[in-house]
Amino acid sequence: MLQQSQAIKLPYHLIADAKSRAELEMRSVPKQVEYFYNLGKIAYENPDLPMQFIIDILESKKDIDNGKISEFKFRDK
């Protein structure tokens, strides 16, 4: 699927916040805004989930997308 982008206007303070957080998280500003959007969307759709659980889900998804997973092997008894 072709991913299209579109310019949008955001208040300066949102961009400044995203920029400072993006530097810490080693993301671009647009990727940080996308990350914040995903956090907010999941939290809105699942109000009973703790924020840290949502963050862990997104981090795990990123690991899967980047191929940083390995199969779990059960120990033989």
Image (tube, helix red, strand yellow):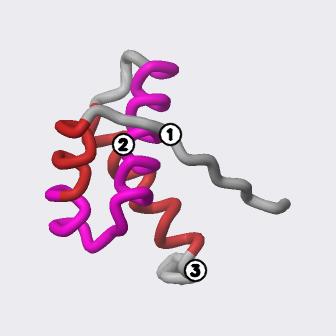
Q: Is residue 53 left or right of residue 5?
A: left
Whether the residues at callouts 1 and 2 have beta carbons within 8 Å, the answer is: no
The answer to which of 36 and 28 lies nearer the viewer is: 28
Image: 63 above or below 15: below
Q: Amino acid at mark 1?
A: Ile
Whether the residues at callouts 3 and 1 have beta carbons within 8 Å, the answer is: no
The answer to which of 35 and 61 lies nearer the viewer is: 35
Placement of the N terminus among the 4 image quadrants: bottom right
Asked whether the viewer can see residue 54, the reply is yes
Q: Which mark is residue 71?
A: 3
- Across and down, in percent, residue 49 comes to 36, 26
**Residue ID at (47%, 41%):** 38
Image: 33 above or below 49: below
Mark 3: few, some, or many residues within 10 Å (few <14, many ≥20)? few
**Residue ID at (56%, 70%):** 64
Cα separation, mark 3 vs mark 1, equals 41 Å
Mark 2 or 3 closer to N-term?
2
Q: Name the residue beneath numbered marker 1.
A: 8
Please, what is the dominant secondary structure of the magenta stretch? helix
**Residue ID at (46%, 49%):** 34
Q: Secondary structure at mark 3?
A: loop
- Across and down, in percent, residue 42 comes to 47, 31
Cα separation, mark 2 vs mark 3, equals 30 Å
Q: Name the residue beneath numbered marker 2.
A: 36
Mark 3 or 1 closer to N-term?
1
- For the record, the magenta segment spans 20-46
